[in-house]
Image (cartoon, helix red, strand yellow):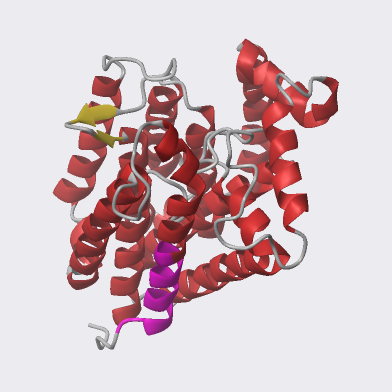
Amino acid sequence: MAKQRAFDRGLFTLVVLLVALGLVMVYSASAAVARAEGAADGLLANPYLRKQALAALIGLGAMLAAMHLDYRWLKRPAVAWALFGGAVVLLVAVLFAPPINGTRRWFLLGGLSLQPSELAKLALVPFVAYHLERKEDRVNRPALLLPVGLGTLLVFGLVLLEPDLGTALLLAVTVFLMLFVAGLSWRYIAAGAAIGLPVLAVLVWSESYRRARLFAFLDPEADPLGAGYQVLQSLIAVGTGGVFGLGLGNSIQKLFYLPYAHSDFIYSILAEELGLLGAGAVVLLFLALSWRGLRAAFHAPDAFGRYLGLGLTAMLVVQALVNISVTIALLPTKGIPLPFLSYGGTSLVVSMTACGVLLNLSEHG
């Protein structure tokens, strides 16, 4: 058994910095919305900050628990299959929940919300890592590709039905990266692209709001008050910030110009208030997170730990890359939060729990 050592304090510090910055930015970005909803001025009166702070406390507890729970517990067949089965049950159940904003993505629990598609990330990655370790010498054979492919397709389909194409694609990309590192043959990659890209095109074209987002991405100024409004307001926020920003709390776009300023587009508000220096610092923090996460993964004492760490790191970093790319119009608009920073309790708890597993991995390197 590999000698256990101290956890990665650098990774722990990165998580704390990102969560702390996220709390500050959620308070700033949601202040106008909170006042409009009747909340009094003041730090503790902001309901968005209170809920996000509660999620941060729960996430801290989950992260500390994951740090002290040997990651190898996750590769027990009963655990891997139970996590996967539980995620599938929740994804099916949420389809019968009352719709919110035209989608069925959340369970409402006494004023708080639970998003099963976020929890599915913590189930699918260990499930794939479990199969990869057991069949590492058969990566390009049906013995591995069938259970991993069918499991991923099942989760992808259920998340898509919510509908949430962005999260479904994020899960698929994470699994692909795990398989690619494991040695997936280029012929399967080519076959997957030949099938997947036309299917993706059909999925985008089959829904009017997805077509509108695609056209707005290609030419947002063609419909500046409609489909292109959100991305244009985001670009205005980023551009207004300049190098040094307008100052913390001084965003103009959060005053009901930029929709979802405290959630999906919080990076735009951050860039407006903290400027290029602040926005660049966030990118550097995520780059450092990817380095420490991959370091923990590739120093793991077994194949399961290697694939588990890779999958969790890819999940966080790819999601951050997609969110930031959307805010600066490099990708079509997607409802994907920025890990640690965007308002959303389930996303924050899941992200911190994933980092807890990475911290546990770092102890066994």
Predominant SS along the magenta part: helix
Range of magenta residues: 7-20
Give the camera-side residue of 9 and 268: 268
Task: Answer whether residue 126 is visible to the viewer in this image.
Answer: no
Rendered residue at 41%/21% (across/down): 162
Give the camera-side residue of 103 and 55: 55
Indicate whether 225 appears above or below 153: above
* Residue 340 image position (x, y, % from top left): 43, 56
* Residue 237 image position (x, y, % from top left): 70, 47
Rendered residue at 30%/66% (across/down): 356
The quarter of the displayed image where residue 282 is located: bottom right
Quadrant in the picture for the C terminus: bottom left
* Residue 308 image position (x, y, % from top left): 37, 60
Magenta stretch encompasses residue 42: no
Task: Answer whether residue 201 is visible to the viewer in this image.
Answer: yes
Indicate whether 84 appears above or below 104: below
* Residue 270 image position (x, y, % from top left): 59, 56
Quadrant in the picture for the N terminus: bottom left
Rendered residue at 38%/43% (across/down): 344
Indicate whether 209 appears above or below 18: above
**Would residue 80 be found to the left or right of residue 95 on screen?**
left
Magenta stretch encompasses residue 13: yes
